[in-house]
Image: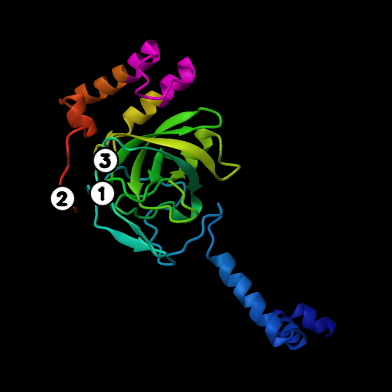
Amino acid sequence: MTMRDLQDPKQLTHSLASLIAPKTLLALAVCLLVSACASPDGKKNNRLNLSKKVVNYGQSVPKGGGHYKVGRPYKIANKWYRPRVDTRYDRVGMASWYGDLFHGRKTANGEVFDMDALTAAHPTLPLPTLVEVTNLTNKRSVIVRVNDRGPYRHNRLIDLSRKAALILGFKKNGTARVRVKYIGRAPMNGDDRFEKRILANKQRYGRLSTIGRRHDTIEHQRVESARNQFSLDRGFGPEQAFGFEQFAGNQ
């Protein structure tokens, strides 16, 4: 290899290829392919058919715009998932988060994913749905809008937006053991005032107990007050606003 080879990129590539064994080149190609299939936050893109990016990072992300969806049973990696309405949903499991690679792309119900919003992906809950997620290690909790499907790796329970993971304190670690509790059906227009109001109350008054712990009367009343006001703003009762009636049919 000469100095000219180093100065000419094309010649340099040719020279390096002649020095590297074919098996080594094949191994390098496989490594590059695997790297290309992972997002910056470590979440692998198993589908390899990402929807077209409709919003670039830094631009305003539209709220709502999707459709209500329960969905039919489906199979991923030899495992069946059966979406359904479950108003008593209350599970414990592992949470992960996703961000850059999916930001600005359409979610499973037609909304646009915003990694800086309080949203999440879940394999079976109706879309969109509000759930409360509590980090069982530090007891932090947040209400998020489930508007996407996933995760499908390592039996994880829920995939949170980068913003939600940051609030729950596990963005750096990547995963956390959490409790996920159903709150109700989310507004179709993407209105997130309820989620933000509860978060603001937590930050103002300190950590609130999990919604539904009625033995902590003061904190429970704060949550219920915000919840009822959210319903009154829209002219209907809490049960209608948050989906405690049964929703039938797949869309």
Residues rendered magenta in the picture: 199-223
Label 2 belongs to which residue? 249
Q: Amino acid at mark 1?
A: Gly
Residue at 59 percent across and 65 percent down: it is: 35
CB of mark 3 within 8 Å of CB of mark 2? no
Place of residue 173 in the rendered image (x, y in percent of width and height, measured from the top left):
60, 43
**Dot 1, how many residues are within 10 Å of its Cα: few (below 14), some (14-19), or many (20+)?**
some
Q: Amino acid at mark 2?
A: Gly
User: Upstream in the sequence, badge 1 or badge 3?
Assistant: 1
Between the C-alphas of marks 1 and 3, the distance is 21 Å
Please name whichever residue, 165 or 200, is drawn nearer the observer in this view of the structure. 165
* In this view, 76 is above or below 203: below
Please indicate, yes or no, whether residue 233 appears anywhere in the rendered image: no
Mark 1 or 3, closer to the camera: 3
CB of mark 2 within 8 Å of CB of mark 1? no
Mark 2 or 1, closer to the camera: 2
Q: Which mark is residue 86?
A: 3
* In this view, 175 is above or below 229: below
